[in-house]
Image: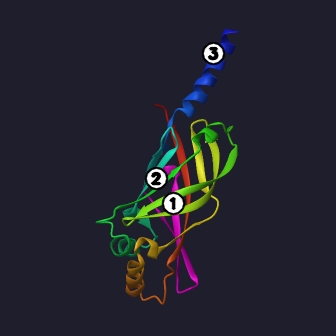
Amino acid sequence: MREMKILLGLLVWLITGSAMAQWTVDPQGSYVGFASVKNELIAENHSFKEISGSVSTSGEAEIVIELASVETNIPIRNERMQAMLFNVADNPTAVVSSLLAVGEYTSLALGQSITQDLRLNINLNGTDVTRNAKVKVTRSADDAFEVTSLGPVLVHASQFALSEGVEALRKVAGLQSIELMVPVTFDLRLVATPQ
C-alpha cells in the first residue's frame, strides 16, 4: 500500500511538474532550414546551426535564430549571405514568437501526437511579419516534445526588405535568377526545465 502511494505521488509530481515547467529549445535536437531556388530550376537546402529559445509556463514561445550560423555547405556562400543578405553586423538574429497550447502538450502520452495551427510572428531585419503554420507535436520523452512543421512556411524576401541583398547575391554569383519566395521548415525539440 505504501509503495502504491509513493508511485501515485511520483506520477502526480511528474504530471504537475511538466505542466508547471518552462520549456527550453534543445539546440542539438532542433532544426530550422530553408530552401533557395536559382536559375529557375536548381533548388538547394540550407539551415541554421545555432538556435535557442524557450516557452513560458503560459505558452509564450520565443525562438532565436543566429543568422551568422547559416549553413549552405559552401563557406564563401555562407559569408556572402551573412554580409550581403542578412547584414549580421546590424541584424544578428531572427526571432520567431507564438503562443503554444502547452496544456494540451503535457496531457499527451509518451509517443502520442497532435496537430495544431500556430500563428507565428517573424521578426527579421527590423520587420515583423505574421504567418500561419500547421505543426505536429509529439511527446518524445517524459520531459521533451518535438514540434515539427507539416509543410513549409512561405516567406518573401521583399517583406523583410531583403530583395536588394538577394539581387547582390545573384550578381556576385553570376546567376540568372534567385527566387524571392523562400520555404522555411523546422523541427524543434523542447525540454522541460522545472520551476
The secondary structure that most of the magenta stretch takes on is: strand
Q: Which mark is residue 63?
A: 2
In the image, what residue occupies the spot 63% across and 15% down?
Answer: 6
- Number of marks: 3
Task: In the rendered view, tell whether residue 98 sits above or below residue 46.
Answer: above
Q: Amino acid at mark 3?
A: Ile
Residue that numbered label 1 is attached to: 32
Q: Secondary structure at mark 2?
A: strand
Tell me which corner region of the image, top left, top right, bottom left or bottom right, holds residue 172.
bottom left
Q: Which comes sooner in the sequence, label 1 or label 2?
A: 1
Question: Label 2 near label 1: C-beta < 8 Å?
Answer: yes
Name the residue carrying label 3.
Answer: 6
Q: Position of residue 14 (x, y in %)?
A: 59, 28
From mark 1 to mark 2, how far is it between C-alphas?
A: 10 Å
Real-space CA distance between mark 2 and mark 3, rounded to the nearest whole angstrom? 38 Å
Q: Residue at x 67, y 39 (%)?
A: 108
In this orientation, which residue lies closer to the viewer: 10 or 76? 10
Disc marking residue 150? none
Q: Is residue 94 magenta?
A: no
Q: Residue at x 52, y 57 (%)?
A: 120
For badge 1, the amino acid type reads Val
The structure's colour scheme is: rainbow
Where does the magenta region start and end? 25-50
Residue 36 in percent (x, y) is at 52, 75
Answer above or below: position of 7 versus 57.
above
Question: Any magenta on residue 42?
Answer: yes
Disc 3 packing (10 Å; few <14; some 14–19; many ≥20): few
- Whole-number angstrom distance, CA of label 3 to CA of label 1: 42 Å
